[in-house]
Amino acid sequence: MTEIDNIRIRPLSEDPSLISRVYEINDSWPVFTPHDMAASALLSRVPEEFPQYCVAATDGGRVVARGLAVPFNSVLDGREELPDQGWDRVLTWAFHDRQHGNAPTAASALEISVDADYLGRGLSYRMLAALRLAAGRQGHDALLAPVRPTAKHLDPHVPMNEYLSRRRDDGLPADPWVRVHVKAGGTVEKLAPASMTVSGSLAQWRQWTGLPFDRDGDVEVPGALAPVHCDTAHDHAVYVEPNVWIRHGGQPRTA
């Protein structure tokens, strides 16, 4: 448990009453991300299935931040520790491994979300440290993270490699969320070029975003890190989100 001022951060396994409350916060995820197939099927089950890997911050009786992580086996045939399909892949591996009794060899963060009223207080650093500690208590020497650069949506047409090369005058990453990870000791390892995928009919995308989706080609969607590809002839649009793998602790391992 971590306590500074009135905010307490602890694993969900230490207070199971928080498991059903971690989604009470006012977060800033784009409206389309819950429609990622892996997220819609599995994400809501993570706090209950892996409470020892997940943490919550409370201020009095209010949940003000959540941090979710999962264990997975990275050494089974055909797997790699830092898969190109990043977020989607480790989430599905975690549940597959749990079902089939595969011993975990790695732990990956899935998200850290802070309530809008509590942004700018350094809580994200504390949540990241709490996730690392939770993974360490389960025997993992590193916490991996397919990180979603929070300002990338401002430049959706810029390739992720080019975006990540941007630095401030002090040499730290220009992106604020990547910078948090680096300042906390994280090491940028590689891209996850297809970390999340959201596909749907044009009617669904119109409903999710309020945009017309009436022309072929790339569509800029608020909050998207890359353009959404629209195909009117086939009545569908597809969003493939790039993330960046960051490692906290441990030593890089070859696949």
Image: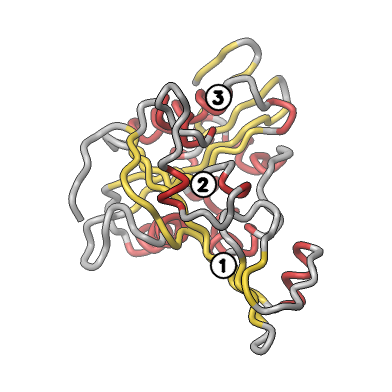
The image shows residue 27 at horizontal and vertical percentages of: 69, 41
* Front residue of 130 and 113: 113
3 or 1: mark nearer the eye: 1
The image shows residue 245 at horizontal and vertical percentages of: 38, 47
* Front residue of 107 and 151: 151
Residue at mark 1: 37
Q: Image point 72% across, 78% down: which residue? A: 215
- Tell me the element at label 1: helix
Amino acid type, mark 2: Arg
Seen as rendered, the residue at the extreme left is: 254
40 relative to 223, above or below: below
Is tag 2's residue or tag 1's residue first in the polypeptide sequence? 1
Is there a contact, CB below 8 Å, between mark 2 and mark 3?
A: no
Q: Which mark is residue 148?
A: 2
The image shows residue 85 at horizontal and vertical percentages of: 41, 62
Q: Image point 78% across, 70% down: which residue? A: 206
Q: Image point 19% across, 46% down: which residue? A: 253
Is there a contact, CB below 8 Å, between mark 2 and mark 1?
A: no
Mark pair 3, 1: CA separation: 30 Å
Tag count in the figure? 3
Amino acid type, mark 3: Ile
Seen as rendered, the residue at the extreme top is: 5
Amino acid type, mark 1: Met
Mark pair 2, 1: CA separation: 17 Å
